[in-house]
Image (cartoon, grey):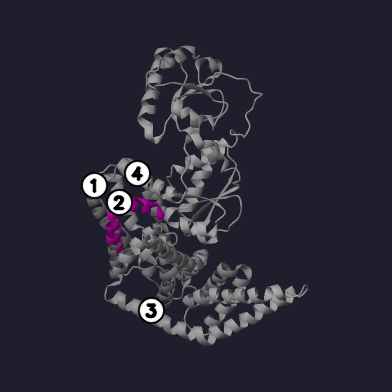
């Protein structure tokens, strides 16, 4: 146990460090793209539309705007607004101290300057007399900022210039001997472990910008953002997958390739770890083709969509970029297809094992969900939730899509609770929060918000826990501490307790464990309805899709009725021992209009 805990702790620390690096780049990707597009279109004389006047924007954006934004963001991550200002001042020192674009220097001086100011405030801020706070705040930041800028100018700047030259020379040497593709042996598994943003935006993007500034393009921008490996894996699932993974793969492929949300294919690889070989094969192939055929981008392609790649491709690199992406997709598809065709399990078995693993993990952390008999307590735990936040590594892509899915479910269920998304690093602890995050990031989310309610999911785009959340919120309007004695007693669940004059639809509850039974019961009851000359529609629906009004007659077993009772108060129910052949079914048909 100690060893496992140690490994988990190391993993969390690595993810935390990687997130800190990408956290300085991600908010500024738009500015990086603005610089890349300006250079691609108007740089003189190599742009699509060379323009000497507009070309004057390119170098200041590269040397001043982008490093200052990165330093400002890094300082803000450490110490809010005061840290952001200190980070920008310190970064200016490293910018002026060298002729190289100082992205790596900004990633050092931004957080360092903010950290020093934070420590200074911890020592002196509480000792400042009333009325002198503004003098202290302004002059402490100004003096420390001046010192940080001077230190960066004389010390950090020259060191980073030499380091940048070595890094650039090393990357160029690796490219010349065609060894760069081997880096994907590390990059692809790291992506699946949710380090994709840390590697891409924390390491490859800063190096890529410096290379692009020197030679006009960089293949480093493509190594993590290449959608080819993920596309190949999802296409293999589309043709050779089984169960739900097969049916969901086509939509996931479209989102991954055109939307650039790479996280969508990670669960498919995690379900069958041997598919990491397909990802590695595709990644290595893509990078080899990029370097061999002169591929490269002017700026970062974020998100990693084929559309973004085409928009920021260098003028002479379109052929290499397109062939590299397609080649990566073909190789990953072939390897994944071989693995899936030799797979003896079914998609349902894989999903069952994944669900079992999630349940065991939740239980070990005392996060298991109560059963139907404890539904009252489960509902009460949601009573204080005022806001739901989906948190992923970058705060975009998969978390935004997960938040959109839950908002849609809330809208259909008539639930009015705020649902937003953000990066794990930006979470702030406060009362009334429900944090939904991926299992790989759950530990970090818990550290950031120990007082919030937490739900960990395997896949933002498909989780049964969303239905549980919807049902629990909906049940808040139904479950009360005191029974309503004023309501007349009626025979709930019996034929005598049903007002058939109000029934406009008959529903059977379907869920994953008994999907076949509900489907068959719906079909048999519908046939019997038609034989009796009745026209009442019959449907199989999920429990959270019901409308709480007496026009719905829901036919359930006694066990299912327990769940139904805490969620709805106005629907009418008929409790039967057997959904397929209980005699009450025929009697109910005769009473329908």
Q: Earlier in the sequence, mark 1 or mark 4?
A: 1
Q: Magenta part of the protein: which range?
A: 263-283
Circles 2 and 1: CB atoms closer than 8 Å: yes
Can you say whether 354 is above or below 517 in the image? below
Residue drawn at the location 29% of the way across and 69% of the way down: 182
Circles 1 and 3: CB atoms closer than 8 Å: no
The Cα–Cα distance between marks 2 and 3, rounded to whole angstroms, is 37 Å
Query: Is 168 contained in the magenta span?
Result: no
Which residue matches tag 3? 168
Which residue matches tag 4? 351
| Tag 1 secondary structure | loop
The Cα–Cα distance between marks 1 and 4, rounded to whole angstroms, is 14 Å
584 or 24: nearer the eye? 584
Q: Residue 272 carries which label?
A: 2
Q: Which of marks 2 and 3 is in front?
A: 2
- Label 1: few (<14), some (14–19) or many (≥20) C-alpha neighbours in 10 Å: some
- Label 4: few (<14), some (14–19) or many (≥20) C-alpha neighbours in 10 Å: some
Residue 521 in view here: yes
Which residue matches tag 1? 343
61 or 453: nearer the eye? 453
150 or 293: nearer the eye? 150
The Cα–Cα distance between marks 4 and 2, rounded to whole angstroms, is 11 Å
Q: Earlier in the sequence, mark 4 or mark 2?
A: 2
Can you say whether 585 is above or below 340 in the image? above
The location of residue 7, given as percent across then percent down, is: 38, 63
Residue drawn at the location 78% of the way across and 73% of the way down: 131
Farthest residue toward the right?
A: 131
Query: Is 276 contained in the magenta span?
Result: yes
Can you say whether 552 is above or below 501 in the image? below
Q: Residue 373 carries which label?
A: none
């Amino acid at each position: 146990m100690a060893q496992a805990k140690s490994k988990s702790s190391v993993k969390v620390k690595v993810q935390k460090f990687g997130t800190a690096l990408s956290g300085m780049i991600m908010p500024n990707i738009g500015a990086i793209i603005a610089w890349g597009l300006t250079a691609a279109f108007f740089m003189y004389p190599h742009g699509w539309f060379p323009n000497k006047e507009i070309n004057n924007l390119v170098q200041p954006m590269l040397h001043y705007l982008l490093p200052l934004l990165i330093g400002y963001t890094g300082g803000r991550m450490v110490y809010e607004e005061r840290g952001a200002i200190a980070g920008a001042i310190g970064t200016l020192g490293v910018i002026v101290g060298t002729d190289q674009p100082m992205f790596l220097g900004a990633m050092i001086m931004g957080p360092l300057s903010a950290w020093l100011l934070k420590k200074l405030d911890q020592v002196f801020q509480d000792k400042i007399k009333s009325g002198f706070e503004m003098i202290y705040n302004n002059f402490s930041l100004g003096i420390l900022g001046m010192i940080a800028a001077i230190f960066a100018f004389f010390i950090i700047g020259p060191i980073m210039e030499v380091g940048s030259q070595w890094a650039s020379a090393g990357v160029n040497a690796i490219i010349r001997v065609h060894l760069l593709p081997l880096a994907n042996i590390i990059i692809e598994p790291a992506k699946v472990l949710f380090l994709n943003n840390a590697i891409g935006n924390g390491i490859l993007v800063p190096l890529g910008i410096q290379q692009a500034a020197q030679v006009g393009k960089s293949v480093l921008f493509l190594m993590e953002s290449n959608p080819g490996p993920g596309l190949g894996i999802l296409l293999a699932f589309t043709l050779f997958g089984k169960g739900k993974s097969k049916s969901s793969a086509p939509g996931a492929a479209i989102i991954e390739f055109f939307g650039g949300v790479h996280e969508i294919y990670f669960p498919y690889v995690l379900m069958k770890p041997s598919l990491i070989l397909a990802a590695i094969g595709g990644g290595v192939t893509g990078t080899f083709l990029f370097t061999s055929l002169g591929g490269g981008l002017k700026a970062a392609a974020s998100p990693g969509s084929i559309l973004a790649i085409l928009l920021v491709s260098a003028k002479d690199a379109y052929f290499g970029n397109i062939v590299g992406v397609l080649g990566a997709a073909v190789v990953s598809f072939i390897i994944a297809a071989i693995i899936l065709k030799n797979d003896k399990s079914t998609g349902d078995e894989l999903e069952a094992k994944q669900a079992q693993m999630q349940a065991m993990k939740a239980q070990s952390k005392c996060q298991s969900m109560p059963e139907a008999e404890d539904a009252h307590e489960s509902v009460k735990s949601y009573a204080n939730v005022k806001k739901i936040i989906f948190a992923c590594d970058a705060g975009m892509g998969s978390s935004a899509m997960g938040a959109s899915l839950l908002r849609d479910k809330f809208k259909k269920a008539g639930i009015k609770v705020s649902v937003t998304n953000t990066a794990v690093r930006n979470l702030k602890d406060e009362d009334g929060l429900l944090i939904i995050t991926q299992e790989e990031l759950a530990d970090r989310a818990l550290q950031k918000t120990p007082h919030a309610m937490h739900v960990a999911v395997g896949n933002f785009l498909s989780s049964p826990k969303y239905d549980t959340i919807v049902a629990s919120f909906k049940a808040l309007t139904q479950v009360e501490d005191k029974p309503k004695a004023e309501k007349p007693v009626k025979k709930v669940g019996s034929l005598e307790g049903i007002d058939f004059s109000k029934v406009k639809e008959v529903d059977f509850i379907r869920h994953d464990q008994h999907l076949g039974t509900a489907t068959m019961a719906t079909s048999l009851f519908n046939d019997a309805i038609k034989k009796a000359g009745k026209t009442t529609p019959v449907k199989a629906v999920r429990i959270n899709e019901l409308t709480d009004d007496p026009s719905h007659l829901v036919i359930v077993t006694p066990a299912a009725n327990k769940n139904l009772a805490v969620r709805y108060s106005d629907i009418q129910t008929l409790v039967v021992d057997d959904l397929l052949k209980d005699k009450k079914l025929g009697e109910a048909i005769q009473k329908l209009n």
